[in-house]
Image: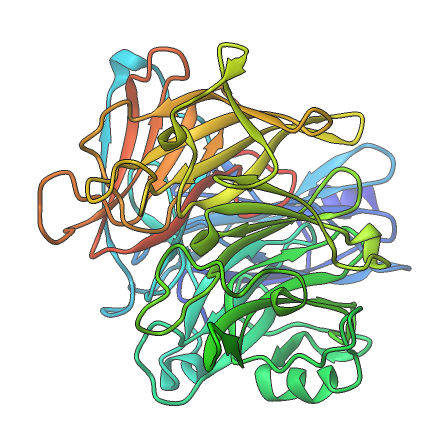
Amino acid sequence: MATALASGNFNSTVSPTNNPLVARYTITVPDGSQVSIQFGLTTAYGTSTWQVDAPTGGGQVSILVAGMLASTTYHMAALIHLRTGTTFGDSDHTFTTGALPTEHLPALSVTANPASGTPCPGVELVNLNPMAACVADLQGNILWYYLNQADLLQDGHPMPLRPLSNGNMMALITNRYTKAKTPYCVLREFDLAGDTVSNQYGPREIDMPTLNTLLLKVPTHYGRTVQVNYYSHDFYPMTNGHVILLCQEFLTVEVDGKNTLVWGDALVDLDDSFTPVWVWSEFDVLDVNRHPYEWLPDHDWTHCNTIEPTPDGNLLLGVRDQSWVLKLHYANGTGTGAILWKMGFEGDFTLMRGGEPDPNTADWFFAQHYPHILTSANGYITSLTVVDNGNYRAGTYPNPYSRGLIVNVDEQKLTVEVAWQYPVTPDFYSYWGGNVVQLPNGNMEICMSRPLPAEPTPVHSFAREVTFHTQELVWQLDITPPYAYRCYRIPSLYPGVQW
């Protein structure tokens, strides 16, 4: 066996897929082995996929090779890692990628500042509204993208797309902001070739009519039945295989003594068969008479944009039009959905500065995007990152300004204090969208979707990596046309692999 393997006598092929930037490498390997594919512009390769286990008893393994430039010839060869610890190499194959599509993808350009350091390694995931999601290298070259023809026929696009721990991707597809007359929404899991995957329950996708039929059997804790009008802005894949899906719900309720059609939000917990098992609605727990922002003309009441689990098994929800971040009683799927606290202007927390209450209410975040847990301890959140878009900032309207923030949080004392902000200028404004994250090298990355420092109309979005302490520019990705909903660095297109 070892002699045959060493001589490269493998039954292996390389074939194209539905994505012109992705190849399918198929090889027959022995029992107990693991396979990865090395690829590059020469036989020195230099880039690798993750390792895939051989089937029980040995047999055929198929690996999608992604992360290649368009219209380029690549060399690739499998590495077979035996259970004995020995590694053998397959013979070299070549594969020529196709061209990028002429529509639906942005133009990307990069500015680097080597004097401030080296960018954090990896690739950049770019979520757009309303174009296709894509992944680029740090030179701005698109290495992967997702386009689905059925979605395009309905003016649907990912908003957002997330990598999964199993090597697949998942996307919330919506036409909410494409002016399409008929709503179209799908939650879908797919592989790097763009093919929808299945599990024991069938294809891993659920459209809105199917979800609404299932929701008739799953009321909220308060007895209401939710009917979804759009999938909206975010979802979160949980470690138990469930997905928390954020949706918009339009409901006629009494506001100021008049029946009014109000745009609110709901959460749906889908199990691994994409069946709803827990449902939450803002109409159960929030005051519809509080509407500080974007109430007219459409009565856009809450406009949530971010959902993620908290360390103690509850949920964190970003509610843009209330300028609040909410913590909801989820209790790992058994909770009531009650609001445990409201963070933000006129909420439950005290804003601090230098250990004392901050008298300047304008220092709060307003109309925020992407509140994200940065650190935690003993089940409590200790810091968050958030984009403070600043719309209707208390005390400053009509002159808002935007910032990326880190805020220190004390959940027990219900205090918040701004620990870091960028940019530190009153004349920068990004009307909506964006995110801020801390990278593994300690730098900060800030995406701004609609930057308006001077122009009356934005010409681009940007993602910017800056040093933490001195806030010097290290790397910037300009995205044309706008709008980039979220951008952030991922290690590679494969779980556990750093490029």
Residue toward you, 312 or 147: 312
Q: Position of residue 82 (x, y in %)?
A: 81, 41
Above or below: residue 52 compared with residue 445: below
Horizontal side of residue 397 vs 446, given as left or right: left
Horizontal side of residue 111 vs 4, given as left or right: left
Q: Where is residue 206 in the image (x, y as percent from the top left)?
A: 64, 79
The residue drawn where x is 47% and y is 83% is 184
Res. 190 in view: no
Residue toward you, 335 or 39: 335
Q: Position of residue 139 (x, y in %)?
A: 29, 37
- View extreme (front): residue: 257
Res. 82 in view: yes
Name which quarter of the figure residue 105 lies in: bottom left
Residue toward you, 91 or 462: 462
Above or below: residue 99 compared with residue 329: below
Name which quarter of the figure residue 124 lies in: top left
The residue drawn where x is 81% and y is 59% is 336
Name which quarter of the figure residue 156 lies in: bottom left
Above or below: residue 148 compared with residue 30: below
